[in-house]
Amino acid sequence: MKRFKTITLRVIAGANVATVLIMLLLGYSGCFNPVEHPILACSTLLFPIFLVFNLLFLVFWLFFCWRGAIIPFVGYLICYFPIRTYIPFNIASEPPEGAIKVVSYNVAGYGYGTTGLPKDEPSEVVSWLINCDADIICIQEGGFSSQDARINDVLKKKYEYSKEEAKDKSTVLTLFSRFPILKSEFIEYESKGNSSIAYEIDYHGKEVVVINNHLESNGLSQEVKQNFKQMVKGDLTAEEAKGESRELFGRLRDAVQRRAPQAEAVAAYIAQRRDEGKSVIVCGDFNDNPISYTHRTIAKDLTDCYVSTGKGPGWSYARGGMRVRIDNILCSDEWEPYGAKVDTKVTVSDHYPVYCWLKMK
């Protein structure tokens, strides 16, 4: 009996070590270029699952053999940085006087594009934008509605400066600002329907670069998302689940490989403007998770406002069984961020708005 117990604990310890190694690989997978390692890039979505597995091992060891708890504990220790990036926990602090409020929001056609809301009815998204009392708002997917003109007119009453642009057939990006917009330019990269725009704004006599991004979408149809949700619930047969897994992986693989050079182009542009001495605020829908190559590349030498001041996983996209933070606000070190949050009360769009306050040092 004692020998059986020893063997069982060793097998469980081996499984725990394997879990820690996979967790470590996934946690730092953002160091690898998806063009060369697409499978690893897609697998980052499994990172929180292995965090939970490791937690279950920790509970097991504490109840049955407390010495074994060193394995999951060391696992969490060596994965501290990706864990903090994925699920930050910070003490809340009030923004100081003079801080500006920045919002990033993929509005999905201001709610009219995804819900079939009658054109003459006010959208919850528009109401939220009117009442959010922000100083800078970066909008993605703002051009899917015949209500655009009316929406812009309403918002322009609150924001003296605005700029709405789309490149070729790409998504419409809009900036609403309380500060003068001096100029704007597209950041050049290859994409069929996505883009990034850099604006220069006059912030009390200082030129600040604000970059609004909508990077390559994963291209998941409602049918694929619904099937994925059923697969997570276990409602599909083994053969159906296998087919859906292939379909999902294929779409994710194609998207991460297209997104990598886009992220590199944005990062290069940021580096160029930083070399010119400009402070930078970066917003937008990255369509990738917080420990991805996309996020790691763009956020290099910048502060992720949610990681430094937010709390919890901060899912900004929660549809079809998928929960992930893909919308971001980043800033250069001239700014101090406060109180980053994701407002999950606004459910009309398939994204939630992300906001924080920034105080220039």
Image (tube, rainbow, N blue to C red):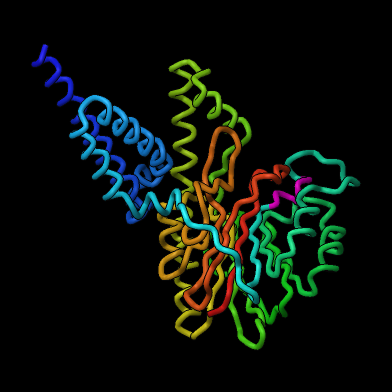
> Residue 128: image x %, image y %?
76, 54
Magenta part mainly helix, strand or loop? Answer: helix
Q: Is residue 20 left or right of residue 294?
A: left
Q: Is residue 311 above or below residue 71?
A: below
Q: Is residue 283 left or right of residue 243?
A: right
Q: Position of residue 286 (x, y in %)?
A: 53, 55
- Indicate whether 200 appears above or below 144: below
Q: Which residue is pictured at 21% across the width and 40% down the height?
A: 70
Picture layout, residue 360 above or below residue 170:
below
Quadrant assignment, res 349: top right
What is the total number of numbered labels drawn onto the structure image?
A: 0
> Is 111 within the magenta?
yes
- As drawn, the residue found furthest toward the top would be 1
- Residue 188 lies in the magenta stretch: no
Q: Nearer the viewer, residue 359 or 258?
A: 359
Can see residue 25?
Answer: yes
Q: Quadrant of the N terminus?
A: top left
Q: Furthest-right residue in view?
A: 120
Q: Is residue 166 visible?
A: no
State left or right for residue 320 relative to residue 33.
right
Range drawn in magenta: 107-112
Seen at 61% across and 72% down, the residue is 96
Residue at 53%, 80% (x, y): give it. Answer: 361
Name the residue rendered at 45%, 48% in the picture: 87
